[in-house]
Image (spheres, grey):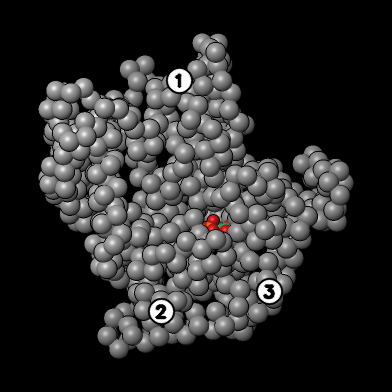
Amino acid sequence: MAVQIFGIPVSRGVAVGRAVLLTSARLDVAHYFVDPGSEEHEVNRLRAARLAVRAELDTLQGELPDDAPPELSAFIDVHKMLLDDPQIGRETAGWIRQRRYNAEWALTAQLDVIARSFDEMDDSYLRDRKADVEQVVERLLYALRGSSVLGGSSALHRGSDGDALVLVAHDIAPADMMQFKQGVFGGFVTDVGGKTSHTAIVARSLDIPAVVGAREASRLIRQDDWVVIDGDNGLLIVDPSPIIVEDYRVRKQESELGRERLKRLVHTPTRTLDGQQVELLANIELPEDCEAALASGAAGVGLFRTEFLFMNRKHALPDEEAQFSAYRKVLQAMGGRPVTIRTIDIGADKPLDTTVDYRDGEFNHLNPALGLRAIRYSLSDPAMFRVQLRALLRAAVCGPLRILIPMLAHAGELRQTFTQLELARNELDAAGIAHGPVEVGAMIEVPGAVLMLPLFLRHFDFISIGTNDLVQYTLAIDRADESVASLYDPLHPAVLQLLGQTIEQAHGAHNWKGRAVHVSVCGEMAGDPQLTRLLLGLGLRSFSMHPAQLLSVKQQVLRADCARLAPLAQAVLAEFEPEGQQRALAALAG
Ligand code: PEP
Ligand code: MG
Protein backbone atom coordinates (compact mmCIF):
# COMPACT_ATOMS: atom_id res chain seq x y z
CA MET A 1 0.00 0.00 0.00
CA ALA A 2 1.31 3.41 -0.94
CA VAL A 3 2.36 5.61 1.98
CA GLN A 4 2.25 9.40 1.78
CA ILE A 5 4.73 11.54 3.67
CA PHE A 6 4.47 15.32 3.75
CA GLY A 7 7.45 17.63 3.96
CA ILE A 8 8.54 21.05 2.81
CA PRO A 9 8.85 21.56 -0.96
CA VAL A 10 12.21 23.13 -1.71
CA SER A 11 12.96 22.32 -5.30
CA ARG A 12 10.29 21.91 -7.93
CA GLY A 13 9.62 19.06 -10.28
CA VAL A 14 8.80 15.40 -10.00
CA ALA A 15 11.14 12.44 -9.52
CA VAL A 16 10.18 8.81 -9.63
CA GLY A 17 12.87 6.38 -8.61
CA ARG A 18 14.34 3.90 -6.21
CA ALA A 19 15.44 5.04 -2.77
CA VAL A 20 19.09 5.10 -1.83
CA LEU A 21 19.16 5.43 1.94
CA LEU A 22 22.03 7.33 3.43
CA THR A 23 21.85 6.27 7.03
CA SER A 24 24.55 5.91 9.60
CA ALA A 25 25.49 2.23 9.56
CA ARG A 26 26.24 2.45 13.24
CA LEU A 27 22.61 3.22 14.10
CA ASP A 28 21.26 -0.20 13.27
CA VAL A 29 24.00 -2.67 14.01
CA ALA A 30 22.92 -6.19 14.95
CA HIS A 31 24.14 -7.50 18.30
CA TYR A 32 24.34 -11.26 18.84
CA PHE A 33 26.73 -13.93 20.10
CA VAL A 34 28.18 -16.23 17.47
CA ASP A 35 27.94 -19.97 18.12
CA PRO A 36 30.89 -21.53 19.96
CA GLY A 37 33.30 -22.81 17.34
CA SER A 38 32.14 -20.22 14.76
CA GLU A 39 34.52 -17.51 15.94
CA GLU A 40 37.03 -18.02 13.11
CA HIS A 41 34.24 -17.91 10.57
CA GLU A 42 33.20 -14.53 12.00
CA VAL A 43 36.81 -13.30 11.97
CA ASN A 44 36.93 -14.27 8.29
CA ARG A 45 33.80 -12.16 7.64
CA LEU A 46 35.64 -9.23 9.15
CA ARG A 47 38.72 -9.96 7.02
CA ALA A 48 36.61 -10.14 3.86
CA ALA A 49 35.00 -6.79 4.75
CA ARG A 50 38.45 -5.22 5.17
CA LEU A 51 39.49 -6.50 1.74
CA ALA A 52 36.28 -5.14 0.23
CA VAL A 53 36.82 -1.72 1.79
CA ARG A 54 40.42 -1.65 0.61
CA ALA A 55 39.25 -2.39 -2.94
CA GLU A 56 36.60 0.35 -2.59
CA LEU A 57 39.22 2.88 -1.44
CA ASP A 58 41.57 1.87 -4.28
CA THR A 59 38.77 2.42 -6.77
CA LEU A 60 37.87 5.77 -5.22
CA GLN A 61 41.50 6.89 -5.40
CA GLY A 62 41.92 5.63 -8.94
CA GLU A 63 38.83 7.53 -10.10
CA LEU A 64 39.79 10.91 -8.63
CA PRO A 65 39.60 13.57 -11.34
CA ASP A 66 42.91 15.16 -12.41
CA ASP A 67 41.99 18.49 -10.85
CA ALA A 68 41.01 16.99 -7.46
CA PRO A 69 42.79 18.67 -4.54
CA PRO A 70 45.91 16.60 -3.64
CA GLU A 71 44.65 16.32 -0.06
CA LEU A 72 41.87 14.03 -1.27
CA SER A 73 44.26 11.29 -2.25
CA ALA A 74 46.25 11.73 0.97
CA PHE A 75 42.98 11.49 2.86
CA ILE A 76 42.21 8.13 1.26
CA ASP A 77 45.76 6.98 2.14
CA VAL A 78 45.04 7.75 5.80
CA HIS A 79 41.92 5.59 5.63
CA LYS A 80 43.89 2.75 4.05
CA MET A 81 46.48 2.99 6.83
CA LEU A 82 43.77 2.89 9.48
CA LEU A 83 42.28 -0.15 7.83
CA ASP A 84 45.56 -1.98 8.32
CA ASP A 85 46.02 -0.74 11.87
CA PRO A 86 46.10 -3.60 14.43
CA GLN A 87 43.74 -1.55 16.62
CA ILE A 88 41.05 -2.13 14.03
CA GLY A 89 42.04 -5.54 12.67
CA ARG A 90 43.61 -7.49 15.52
CA GLU A 91 41.77 -5.91 18.44
CA THR A 92 38.36 -6.28 16.79
CA ALA A 93 39.11 -9.92 16.10
CA GLY A 94 39.90 -10.16 19.82
CA TRP A 95 36.32 -9.18 20.73
CA ILE A 96 35.04 -11.89 18.40
CA ARG A 97 37.37 -14.62 19.71
CA GLN A 98 37.16 -13.79 23.41
CA ARG A 99 33.56 -12.60 23.77
CA ARG A 100 31.96 -14.26 20.74
CA TYR A 101 30.55 -10.91 19.60
CA ASN A 102 29.35 -10.83 15.99
CA ALA A 103 31.69 -8.81 13.73
CA GLU A 104 29.48 -5.67 13.64
CA TRP A 105 29.13 -5.58 17.41
CA ALA A 106 32.87 -6.19 17.83
CA LEU A 107 33.63 -3.28 15.49
CA THR A 108 31.40 -0.79 17.32
CA ALA A 109 32.74 -2.00 20.67
CA GLN A 110 36.30 -1.46 19.46
CA LEU A 111 35.35 1.92 18.01
CA ASP A 112 34.19 3.02 21.48
CA VAL A 113 37.56 2.04 22.92
CA ILE A 114 39.48 3.87 20.21
CA ALA A 115 37.21 6.94 20.41
CA ARG A 116 37.77 7.21 24.14
CA SER A 117 41.55 7.07 23.73
CA PHE A 118 41.37 9.78 21.04
CA ASP A 119 39.24 11.99 23.29
CA GLU A 120 41.95 11.86 25.93
CA MET A 121 44.70 13.07 23.58
CA ASP A 122 46.14 16.55 24.02
CA ASP A 123 47.18 16.93 20.41
CA SER A 124 44.20 18.42 18.54
CA TYR A 125 45.44 17.04 15.19
CA LEU A 126 45.48 13.50 16.54
CA ARG A 127 42.16 14.08 18.28
CA ASP A 128 40.66 14.97 14.93
CA ARG A 129 41.71 11.60 13.50
CA LYS A 130 38.82 10.12 15.46
CA ALA A 131 36.49 11.14 12.64
CA ASP A 132 38.67 9.21 10.19
CA VAL A 133 38.48 6.07 12.33
CA GLU A 134 34.71 6.47 12.55
CA GLN A 135 34.45 6.74 8.79
CA VAL A 136 36.58 3.64 8.25
CA VAL A 137 34.47 1.68 10.75
CA GLU A 138 31.34 2.91 9.01
CA ARG A 139 32.69 1.62 5.69
CA LEU A 140 33.49 -1.75 7.27
CA LEU A 141 29.96 -1.98 8.66
CA TYR A 142 28.53 -1.33 5.22
CA ALA A 143 30.86 -3.92 3.73
CA LEU A 144 29.71 -6.48 6.30
CA ARG A 145 26.19 -5.85 5.05
CA GLY A 146 27.41 -6.43 1.53
CA SER A 147 26.92 -2.83 0.42
CA SER A 148 28.97 0.35 -0.02
CA VAL A 149 28.57 3.64 1.86
CA LEU A 150 26.08 4.77 -0.74
CA GLY A 151 23.81 1.88 0.09
CA GLY A 152 24.20 -0.95 -2.35
CA SER A 153 26.62 -1.89 -5.04
CA SER A 154 24.14 -0.76 -7.65
CA ALA A 155 23.68 2.60 -5.95
CA LEU A 156 25.50 4.64 -8.52
CA HIS A 157 23.86 3.12 -11.54
CA ARG A 158 20.53 4.09 -12.88
CA GLY A 159 17.81 1.45 -12.93
CA SER A 160 17.72 -0.55 -16.11
CA ASP A 161 14.39 1.10 -16.93
CA GLY A 162 16.07 4.51 -16.82
CA ASP A 163 14.38 5.62 -13.61
CA ALA A 164 16.36 7.88 -11.38
CA LEU A 165 17.68 7.10 -7.93
CA VAL A 166 16.50 9.31 -5.12
CA LEU A 167 18.56 10.01 -2.05
CA VAL A 168 16.86 9.69 1.32
CA ALA A 169 18.71 10.81 4.45
CA HIS A 170 18.04 12.06 7.92
CA ASP A 171 20.13 15.10 7.08
CA ILE A 172 22.64 16.07 4.42
CA ALA A 173 25.21 18.75 5.14
CA PRO A 174 25.45 21.51 2.48
CA ALA A 175 29.03 20.37 1.90
CA ASP A 176 27.91 16.80 1.19
CA MET A 177 25.14 18.04 -1.06
CA MET A 178 27.81 19.78 -3.14
CA GLN A 179 29.32 16.39 -3.90
CA PHE A 180 26.11 15.36 -5.61
CA LYS A 181 26.52 18.08 -8.25
CA GLN A 182 27.76 15.33 -10.56
CA GLY A 183 24.14 14.39 -11.02
CA VAL A 184 23.91 10.86 -9.68
CA PHE A 185 20.55 11.44 -8.00
CA GLY A 186 17.23 12.47 -9.47
CA GLY A 187 15.78 13.75 -6.22
CA PHE A 188 16.47 14.36 -2.52
CA VAL A 189 14.55 13.81 0.67
CA THR A 190 15.68 14.70 4.18
CA ASP A 191 13.97 14.34 7.55
CA VAL A 192 15.13 17.75 8.75
CA GLY A 193 15.74 21.22 7.31
CA GLY A 194 13.74 24.27 6.24
CA LYS A 195 12.96 25.92 2.93
CA THR A 196 15.95 28.25 2.99
CA SER A 197 18.40 26.04 4.88
CA HIS A 198 21.63 25.94 2.90
CA THR A 199 21.12 22.26 2.09
CA ALA A 200 17.81 23.22 0.47
CA ILE A 201 19.48 26.08 -1.41
CA VAL A 202 22.13 23.75 -2.81
CA ALA A 203 19.42 21.22 -3.74
CA ARG A 204 17.63 23.99 -5.61
CA SER A 205 20.82 24.94 -7.40
CA LEU A 206 21.08 21.33 -8.59
CA ASP A 207 17.62 21.83 -10.11
CA ILE A 208 16.44 18.47 -8.85
CA PRO A 209 13.12 17.83 -7.06
CA ALA A 210 13.69 17.96 -3.31
CA VAL A 211 11.61 17.75 -0.15
CA VAL A 212 13.07 18.52 3.28
CA GLY A 213 11.61 18.41 6.79
CA ALA A 214 9.94 15.09 5.96
CA ARG A 215 10.45 14.03 9.58
CA GLU A 216 10.14 10.22 9.51
CA ALA A 217 11.10 9.67 5.87
CA SER A 218 14.45 7.99 6.47
CA ARG A 219 12.79 5.62 8.96
CA LEU A 220 9.73 4.79 6.86
CA ILE A 221 11.46 4.44 3.51
CA ARG A 222 13.58 1.34 2.96
CA GLN A 223 16.53 0.79 0.68
CA ASP A 224 15.39 0.32 -2.91
CA ASP A 225 11.75 1.28 -2.22
CA TRP A 226 10.01 2.99 -5.11
CA VAL A 227 9.45 6.63 -4.23
CA VAL A 228 7.72 9.52 -5.94
CA ILE A 229 9.05 12.95 -4.96
CA ASP A 230 6.61 15.73 -5.72
CA GLY A 231 8.87 18.76 -5.28
CA ASP A 232 6.06 21.18 -6.13
CA ASN A 233 3.82 20.08 -3.27
CA GLY A 234 6.32 18.69 -0.74
CA LEU A 235 4.84 15.21 -1.03
CA LEU A 236 6.51 11.80 -1.02
CA ILE A 237 4.70 8.67 -2.06
CA VAL A 238 6.38 5.44 -1.01
CA ASP A 239 5.58 2.27 -2.88
CA PRO A 240 3.16 3.99 -5.28
CA SER A 241 0.66 2.01 -7.32
CA PRO A 242 1.37 1.70 -11.07
CA ILE A 243 -1.44 4.24 -11.74
CA ILE A 244 0.20 6.84 -9.47
CA VAL A 245 3.61 6.21 -11.06
CA GLU A 246 2.11 6.68 -14.50
CA ASP A 247 0.35 9.85 -13.43
CA TYR A 248 3.59 11.32 -12.07
CA ARG A 249 5.54 10.24 -15.13
CA VAL A 250 3.13 12.26 -17.25
CA ARG A 251 3.47 15.25 -14.90
CA LYS A 252 7.25 14.93 -15.07
CA GLN A 253 7.16 14.99 -18.85
CA GLU A 254 4.84 18.01 -18.83
CA SER A 255 7.08 19.92 -16.48
CA GLU A 256 10.15 19.08 -18.59
CA LEU A 257 8.29 20.25 -21.66
CA GLY A 258 7.39 23.51 -19.90
CA ARG A 259 11.04 24.08 -19.09
CA GLU A 260 12.02 23.40 -22.70
CA ARG A 261 9.51 26.02 -23.84
CA LEU A 262 10.92 28.58 -21.40
CA LYS A 263 14.32 28.24 -23.07
CA ARG A 264 12.96 30.29 -25.96
CA LEU A 265 13.17 33.34 -23.70
CA VAL A 266 16.93 33.11 -23.14
CA HIS A 267 17.83 35.87 -25.58
CA THR A 268 14.72 38.02 -25.11
CA PRO A 269 15.63 41.40 -23.53
CA THR A 270 14.39 41.53 -19.94
CA ARG A 271 11.96 44.43 -20.17
CA THR A 272 8.49 44.89 -18.70
CA LEU A 273 5.42 45.79 -20.75
CA ASP A 274 5.91 49.46 -19.81
CA GLY A 275 9.54 49.37 -20.93
CA GLN A 276 11.31 49.04 -17.57
CA GLN A 277 14.70 47.38 -17.88
CA VAL A 278 15.18 44.58 -15.31
CA GLU A 279 18.46 42.90 -14.42
CA LEU A 280 18.36 39.12 -13.77
CA LEU A 281 21.55 37.78 -12.23
CA ALA A 282 22.71 34.33 -11.16
CA ASN A 283 23.54 32.93 -7.72
CA ILE A 284 26.40 30.44 -7.89
CA GLU A 285 28.29 28.24 -5.45
CA LEU A 286 31.26 27.16 -7.56
CA PRO A 287 33.02 28.54 -10.68
CA GLU A 288 31.61 25.61 -12.67
CA ASP A 289 28.10 26.99 -12.12
CA CYS A 290 28.87 29.84 -14.56
CA GLU A 291 27.97 27.51 -17.39
CA ALA A 292 24.38 27.19 -16.12
CA ALA A 293 24.30 30.94 -15.42
CA LEU A 294 25.22 31.74 -19.03
CA ALA A 295 22.87 29.13 -20.43
CA SER A 296 19.99 30.77 -18.56
CA GLY A 297 20.87 34.15 -20.07
CA ALA A 298 21.93 35.74 -16.75
CA ALA A 299 23.22 39.30 -17.05
CA GLY A 300 25.99 38.51 -14.58
CA VAL A 301 26.60 36.89 -11.20
CA GLY A 302 24.71 38.57 -8.38
CA LEU A 303 25.94 36.28 -5.61
CA PHE A 304 28.89 33.90 -5.55
CA ARG A 305 28.72 32.16 -2.15
CA THR A 306 32.47 31.65 -1.72
CA GLU A 307 32.16 29.64 1.49
CA PHE A 308 31.57 26.56 -0.66
CA LEU A 309 35.19 26.84 -1.87
CA PHE A 310 36.17 26.41 1.76
CA MET A 311 34.12 23.25 2.30
CA ASN A 312 34.87 19.58 1.64
CA ARG A 313 38.51 20.34 2.33
CA LYS A 314 40.51 18.35 4.77
CA HIS A 315 43.35 19.96 6.68
CA ALA A 316 43.74 23.27 4.79
CA LEU A 317 41.75 26.25 3.60
CA PRO A 318 42.20 27.43 0.02
CA ASP A 319 45.20 29.75 -0.07
CA GLU A 320 45.42 33.09 -1.89
CA GLU A 321 46.47 31.49 -5.18
CA ALA A 322 43.67 28.92 -5.12
CA GLN A 323 41.10 31.58 -4.34
CA PHE A 324 42.49 33.99 -6.94
CA SER A 325 42.29 31.30 -9.58
CA ALA A 326 38.64 30.48 -8.65
CA TYR A 327 37.57 34.15 -8.75
CA ARG A 328 39.43 34.76 -12.01
CA LYS A 329 37.76 31.70 -13.50
CA VAL A 330 34.33 33.16 -12.73
CA LEU A 331 35.20 36.59 -14.14
CA GLN A 332 36.65 35.08 -17.29
CA ALA A 333 33.74 32.70 -17.74
CA MET A 334 31.26 35.57 -17.41
CA GLY A 335 33.09 37.41 -20.19
CA GLY A 336 32.86 41.01 -18.97
CA ARG A 337 29.48 40.72 -17.27
CA PRO A 338 29.42 42.03 -13.69
CA VAL A 339 30.33 39.50 -11.02
CA THR A 340 29.44 39.90 -7.34
CA ILE A 341 31.56 37.78 -5.03
CA ARG A 342 30.57 37.54 -1.41
CA THR A 343 33.22 37.11 1.25
CA ILE A 344 32.78 33.89 3.21
CA ASP A 345 29.60 33.29 5.13
CA ILE A 346 30.90 30.49 7.34
CA GLY A 347 29.01 29.48 10.46
CA ALA A 348 25.41 28.58 11.42
CA ASP A 349 24.40 25.74 9.08
CA LYS A 350 27.63 26.09 7.05
CA PRO A 351 30.43 25.14 9.45
CA LEU A 352 33.89 24.39 8.17
CA ASP A 353 35.32 20.91 8.44
CA THR A 354 36.70 20.48 11.93
CA THR A 355 40.07 19.46 10.54
CA VAL A 356 40.60 22.94 9.09
CA ASP A 357 38.83 25.07 11.64
CA TYR A 358 41.11 25.61 14.57
CA ARG A 359 38.12 27.19 16.32
CA ASP A 360 36.39 23.83 16.31
CA GLY A 361 33.81 23.90 19.04
CA GLU A 362 33.05 27.58 18.75
CA PHE A 363 30.07 26.69 16.58
CA ASN A 364 28.58 24.40 19.13
CA HIS A 365 26.76 27.29 20.69
CA LEU A 366 23.07 27.01 21.34
CA ASN A 367 22.26 29.62 18.69
CA PRO A 368 24.85 29.33 15.94
CA ALA A 369 22.79 31.54 13.59
CA LEU A 370 23.29 34.35 16.10
CA GLY A 371 26.92 33.51 16.70
CA LEU A 372 30.27 33.78 14.98
CA ARG A 373 29.02 33.85 11.41
CA ALA A 374 29.73 35.60 8.09
CA ILE A 375 31.57 38.93 8.48
CA ARG A 376 31.91 38.31 12.22
CA TYR A 377 33.84 35.15 11.41
CA SER A 378 36.04 36.95 8.87
CA LEU A 379 36.79 39.86 11.20
CA SER A 380 37.68 37.48 14.02
CA ASP A 381 40.61 36.31 11.89
CA PRO A 382 41.84 39.38 9.97
CA ALA A 383 44.83 37.55 8.44
CA MET A 384 42.53 34.94 6.89
CA PHE A 385 40.09 37.66 5.80
CA ARG A 386 42.87 39.55 4.02
CA VAL A 387 43.90 36.42 2.13
CA GLN A 388 40.42 36.45 0.61
CA LEU A 389 40.43 40.22 0.05
CA ARG A 390 43.84 40.12 -1.68
CA ALA A 391 42.69 37.27 -3.93
CA LEU A 392 39.58 39.29 -4.83
CA LEU A 393 41.48 42.52 -5.50
CA ARG A 394 43.89 40.62 -7.74
CA ALA A 395 41.05 38.98 -9.64
CA ALA A 396 39.48 42.40 -10.24
CA VAL A 397 42.09 42.92 -12.97
CA CYS A 398 40.18 40.34 -15.03
CA GLY A 399 36.74 41.97 -15.10
CA PRO A 400 34.09 44.05 -13.33
CA LEU A 401 34.12 42.76 -9.76
CA ARG A 402 31.89 43.70 -6.86
CA ILE A 403 32.76 42.50 -3.35
CA LEU A 404 29.77 41.77 -1.15
CA ILE A 405 30.00 41.64 2.65
CA PRO A 406 27.50 39.40 4.48
CA MET A 407 25.55 40.07 7.68
CA LEU A 408 26.79 43.53 8.61
CA ALA A 409 24.96 45.20 11.47
CA HIS A 410 27.37 47.50 13.30
CA ALA A 411 29.12 50.69 12.23
CA GLY A 412 32.26 49.20 13.77
CA GLU A 413 32.05 46.21 11.41
CA LEU A 414 31.81 48.54 8.43
CA ARG A 415 34.86 50.45 9.59
CA GLN A 416 36.91 47.31 10.25
CA THR A 417 35.93 45.86 6.88
CA PHE A 418 37.12 48.95 5.00
CA THR A 419 40.31 49.01 7.06
CA GLN A 420 41.07 45.39 6.14
CA LEU A 421 40.37 46.13 2.50
CA GLU A 422 42.78 49.06 2.58
CA LEU A 423 45.42 46.92 4.31
CA ALA A 424 44.98 44.21 1.68
CA ARG A 425 45.52 46.80 -1.08
CA ASN A 426 48.63 48.10 0.68
CA GLU A 427 50.00 44.58 1.05
CA LEU A 428 49.59 43.96 -2.67
CA ASP A 429 51.21 47.31 -3.50
CA ALA A 430 54.14 46.55 -1.20
CA ALA A 431 54.64 43.21 -2.94
CA GLY A 432 54.31 44.82 -6.37
CA ILE A 433 51.28 42.67 -7.26
CA ALA A 434 48.69 44.09 -9.65
CA HIS A 435 45.12 44.60 -8.47
CA GLY A 436 42.00 46.13 -9.92
CA PRO A 437 39.18 48.48 -8.90
CA VAL A 438 36.24 46.98 -7.04
CA GLU A 439 32.81 48.13 -5.95
CA VAL A 440 31.98 47.20 -2.37
CA GLY A 441 28.49 46.26 -1.25
CA ALA A 442 26.68 45.21 1.90
CA MET A 443 24.17 42.48 2.37
CA ILE A 444 21.09 43.77 4.09
CA GLU A 445 19.91 40.73 5.99
CA VAL A 446 19.63 41.83 9.59
CA PRO A 447 16.62 44.00 10.55
CA GLY A 448 18.99 46.31 12.43
CA ALA A 449 20.74 47.11 9.15
CA VAL A 450 17.43 48.18 7.55
CA LEU A 451 16.71 50.47 10.46
CA MET A 452 20.04 52.23 9.94
CA LEU A 453 20.08 52.01 6.17
CA PRO A 454 21.34 55.61 5.64
CA LEU A 455 24.71 54.51 7.07
CA PHE A 456 24.93 51.68 4.54
CA LEU A 457 23.78 53.86 1.67
CA ARG A 458 26.46 56.42 2.50
CA HIS A 459 29.39 54.00 2.65
CA PHE A 460 28.66 51.35 0.03
CA ASP A 461 28.44 51.25 -3.76
CA PHE A 462 25.55 48.78 -3.70
CA ILE A 463 23.36 46.80 -1.35
CA SER A 464 21.95 43.33 -1.80
CA ILE A 465 18.99 42.22 0.29
CA GLY A 466 19.42 38.73 1.75
CA THR A 467 15.80 37.85 2.31
CA ASN A 468 16.59 34.35 3.60
CA ASP A 469 18.25 35.75 6.68
CA LEU A 470 16.08 38.85 6.82
CA VAL A 471 13.04 36.59 7.32
CA GLN A 472 14.93 34.44 9.82
CA TYR A 473 16.10 37.35 11.94
CA THR A 474 12.92 39.44 11.67
CA LEU A 475 10.63 36.62 12.73
CA ALA A 476 13.09 34.84 15.04
CA ILE A 477 12.61 31.60 13.06
CA ASP A 478 15.61 29.35 12.53
CA ARG A 479 15.56 28.88 8.76
CA ALA A 480 17.02 25.37 9.08
CA ASP A 481 14.57 24.09 11.71
CA GLU A 482 11.64 22.17 10.26
CA SER A 483 9.69 22.33 13.52
CA VAL A 484 9.09 26.07 12.99
CA ALA A 485 9.13 25.99 9.19
CA SER A 486 5.42 26.81 8.97
CA LEU A 487 6.16 30.15 10.66
CA TYR A 488 8.91 31.05 8.19
CA ASP A 489 6.95 33.45 6.03
CA PRO A 490 8.51 35.76 3.43
CA LEU A 491 5.12 37.47 3.08
CA HIS A 492 4.87 38.32 6.77
CA PRO A 493 3.87 42.01 6.90
CA ALA A 494 6.93 42.85 9.02
CA VAL A 495 9.25 41.34 6.39
CA LEU A 496 7.47 43.18 3.58
CA GLN A 497 7.72 46.48 5.47
CA LEU A 498 11.49 46.05 5.80
CA LEU A 499 11.84 44.99 2.19
CA GLY A 500 9.72 47.85 0.83
CA GLN A 501 11.52 50.36 3.05
CA THR A 502 14.96 49.21 1.89
CA ILE A 503 14.12 49.33 -1.82
CA GLU A 504 12.43 52.73 -1.50
CA GLN A 505 15.24 54.33 0.49
CA ALA A 506 17.89 52.96 -1.85
CA HIS A 507 16.21 54.51 -4.87
CA GLY A 508 17.69 57.90 -5.54
CA ALA A 509 20.27 57.45 -2.74
CA HIS A 510 23.83 58.56 -3.40
CA ASN A 511 26.88 57.42 -1.48
CA TRP A 512 29.70 59.62 -0.18
CA LYS A 513 31.32 59.52 -3.61
CA GLY A 514 28.13 61.02 -5.08
CA ARG A 515 27.28 57.83 -6.99
CA ALA A 516 23.84 56.19 -7.12
CA VAL A 517 23.58 53.12 -4.89
CA HIS A 518 22.43 50.01 -6.73
CA VAL A 519 19.95 47.72 -4.92
CA SER A 520 19.21 44.11 -5.60
CA VAL A 521 17.67 41.07 -3.87
CA CYS A 522 19.72 37.86 -3.79
CA GLY A 523 17.70 35.77 -1.31
CA GLU A 524 15.36 33.01 -2.43
CA MET A 525 12.45 35.47 -2.78
CA ALA A 526 14.13 36.86 -5.91
CA GLY A 527 13.89 33.46 -7.60
CA ASP A 528 10.25 32.78 -6.75
CA PRO A 529 8.16 33.64 -9.83
CA GLN A 530 5.09 34.04 -7.62
CA LEU A 531 6.76 37.01 -5.94
CA THR A 532 8.15 38.71 -9.05
CA ARG A 533 5.17 41.05 -9.51
CA LEU A 534 5.26 42.07 -5.87
CA LEU A 535 8.98 42.86 -5.98
CA LEU A 536 8.63 44.76 -9.25
CA GLY A 537 5.75 46.71 -7.72
CA LEU A 538 7.93 47.58 -4.74
CA GLY A 539 10.40 49.10 -7.20
CA LEU A 540 12.98 46.32 -7.46
CA ARG A 541 14.79 46.17 -10.81
CA SER A 542 17.63 43.76 -10.01
CA PHE A 543 17.08 40.13 -8.99
CA SER A 544 19.67 37.44 -8.31
CA MET A 545 18.71 33.76 -8.18
CA HIS A 546 19.73 30.24 -9.09
CA PRO A 547 20.01 29.89 -12.87
CA ALA A 548 17.31 27.19 -12.81
CA GLN A 549 14.74 29.79 -11.74
CA LEU A 550 15.80 32.61 -14.01
CA LEU A 551 13.61 31.96 -17.03
CA SER A 552 10.43 31.49 -14.97
CA VAL A 553 11.09 34.84 -13.32
CA LYS A 554 11.85 36.38 -16.71
CA GLN A 555 8.51 35.19 -18.04
CA GLN A 556 6.82 37.08 -15.19
CA VAL A 557 8.86 40.21 -15.88
CA LEU A 558 7.91 40.19 -19.56
CA ARG A 559 4.21 40.07 -18.64
CA ALA A 560 4.40 42.80 -15.97
CA ASP A 561 3.45 46.47 -16.10
CA CYS A 562 5.36 48.23 -13.32
CA ALA A 563 3.26 51.39 -13.39
CA ARG A 564 0.16 49.31 -12.71
CA LEU A 565 1.87 47.09 -10.11
CA ALA A 566 3.31 49.92 -7.97
CA PRO A 567 0.02 51.02 -6.28
CA LEU A 568 -1.06 47.38 -5.94
CA ALA A 569 2.19 46.51 -4.14
CA GLN A 570 1.72 49.51 -1.83
CA ALA A 571 -1.77 48.19 -1.07
CA VAL A 572 -0.19 44.88 0.01
CA LEU A 573 2.18 46.76 2.33
CA ALA A 574 -0.75 48.59 3.92
CA GLU A 575 -2.44 45.35 5.01
CA PHE A 576 -1.61 43.71 8.32
CA GLU A 577 -4.62 41.40 8.62
CA PRO A 578 -4.15 38.06 6.79
CA GLU A 579 -7.49 38.31 4.91
CA GLY A 580 -6.77 41.84 3.76
CA GLN A 581 -3.28 40.86 2.66
CA GLN A 582 -4.68 37.88 0.74
CA ARG A 583 -7.10 40.18 -1.11
CA ALA A 584 -4.34 42.68 -1.91
CA LEU A 585 -2.06 39.89 -3.15
CA ALA A 586 -4.84 38.47 -5.30
CA ALA A 587 -5.36 41.91 -6.89
CA LEU A 588 -1.63 42.11 -7.57
CA ALA A 589 -1.60 38.65 -9.13
CA GLY A 590 -4.64 39.42 -11.30
C1 PEP B 1 20.21 35.47 2.27
O1 PEP B 1 20.36 35.42 3.48
O2 PEP B 1 19.15 35.79 1.71
C2 PEP B 1 21.35 35.14 1.37
C3 PEP B 1 21.29 35.33 0.08
O3 PEP B 1 22.44 34.58 1.93
P1 PEP B 1 22.52 33.07 2.45
O4 PEP B 1 21.29 32.35 1.98
O5 PEP B 1 23.77 32.49 1.90
O6 PEP B 1 22.56 33.24 3.94
MG1 MG C 1 22.32 35.32 4.31
Quadrant of ligand 1 in image: bottom right
Is 570 situated left or right of 238 in this image? right
Q: Which residue is mark 2?
A: 382
Residue 14 seen from this side: no
Could you say whether the residue bearing mark 3 is in a helix, strand or loop? Answer: helix
> Label 2: how many residues lie within 10 Å, few (<14), some (14-19) or many (20+)?
some
Is 101 situated left or right of 159 in this image? left
Q: Tell me the kind of residue under disc 1.
A: Trp
Position of 563 relative to 184 (above/below) = below
Separation of residues labelled 2 and 1 (CA atoms): 51 Å
Q: Tell me the kind of residue under disc 3.
A: Leu
Say which quarter of the image contains residue 244. Answer: top right
Q: Earlier in the sequence, mark 2 or mark 1?
A: 1
Estimate the x, y position of residue 93 in percent, counting from the top left. Answer: 16, 37
Point out which mark residue 453 bears: 3
Which quadrant would the C terminus be assigned to in this image?
top right
Which quadrant would the N terminus be assigned to in this image?
top right
Is 363 situated left or right of 64 in this image? right
Q: Work out whether residue 350 or residue 440 is closer to the camera in this orientation and state it.
A: 350
Q: Residue at x 20, y 38 (%)?
A: 95
Residue 371 seen from this side: yes
Q: Which residue is mark 1?
A: 226
Could you say whether the residue bearing mark 2 is in a helix, strand or loop? Answer: helix
Separation of residues labelled 3 and 1 (CA atoms): 51 Å
